[in-house]
Amino acid sequence: MSHAAASAAPTAASVAVRPVVVVGAGTMGAGIAQVFASSGRPVLLLEPSEAALKRGLAGIEKSLGRLVEKGTLPAGAREETLGRRN
């Protein structure tokens, strides 16, 4: 292997996309999950309380909906982002 090949940065095609695990679906956890999902990463949002998990997911949906309404996020991107969460 040549020196140039050994020191070359990995390409997007060669790097596996690993899921992000966020513990807690409160305001901060849901926000972190939304940012990672919006950037294309699969997200597993963990919350022991089913009610709290539902609130967190609803908050993400509401936030993305506001971005679509403002025109800062295409509707298709909203659906893609929602598809990356658990």
Image (cartoon, rainbow, N blue to C red):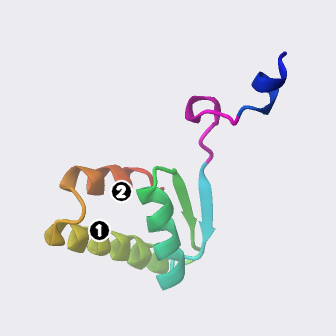
- Which percent across, then down, holds residue 54? 41, 73
Q: Which of 10 and 50 is in front in this view?
A: 10
Can you say whether 71 is above or below 5 in the image?
below
CB of mark 2 within 8 Å of CB of mark 1?
Answer: yes
Q: Which residue is drawn at 45% across and 57% down?
A: 37
Q: Which of 54 and 68 is in front in this view?
A: 68
- Which percent across, then down, holds residue 38? 41, 58
Q: Residue at x 44, y 66 (%)?
A: 34
Badge 2 density bin: few <14, some 14–19, many ≥20, Cα 10 Å: some
| Mark drawn on residue 82 | 2
Q: Which image quarter: residue 3?
A: top right
Q: Which residue is drawn at 58% across and 76% down?
A: 24
Could you say whether the residue bearing mark 2 is in a helix, strand or loop?
Answer: helix
Q: In which quarter of the image is the N terminus?
A: top right
Q: How far apart are marks 2 and 1 (CA)?
A: 9 Å
Q: Does residue 30 appear to the left or right of 4 in the view shown? A: left
Q: Which amino acid does label 1 sit on?
A: Leu
Q: Residue furthest top?
A: 1
- Which percent across, then down, holds residue 74? 21, 56
First in residue order: circle 2 vs circle 1: 1
Q: Does residue 10 appear to the left or right of 60 in the view shown? A: right
Q: Nearer the viewer, residue 7 or 65?
A: 7
Can you say whether 35 is above or below 28 in the image?
above
Q: Does residue 53 appear to the left or right of 20 in the view shown? A: left
Can you say whether 10 is above or below 40 in the image?
above
Residues in magenta, as a range = 9-18
Q: Mark 1 points at which residue?
A: 64
Q: Which amino acid does label 2 sit on?
A: Leu
Can you say whether 40 is above or below 8 in the image?
below
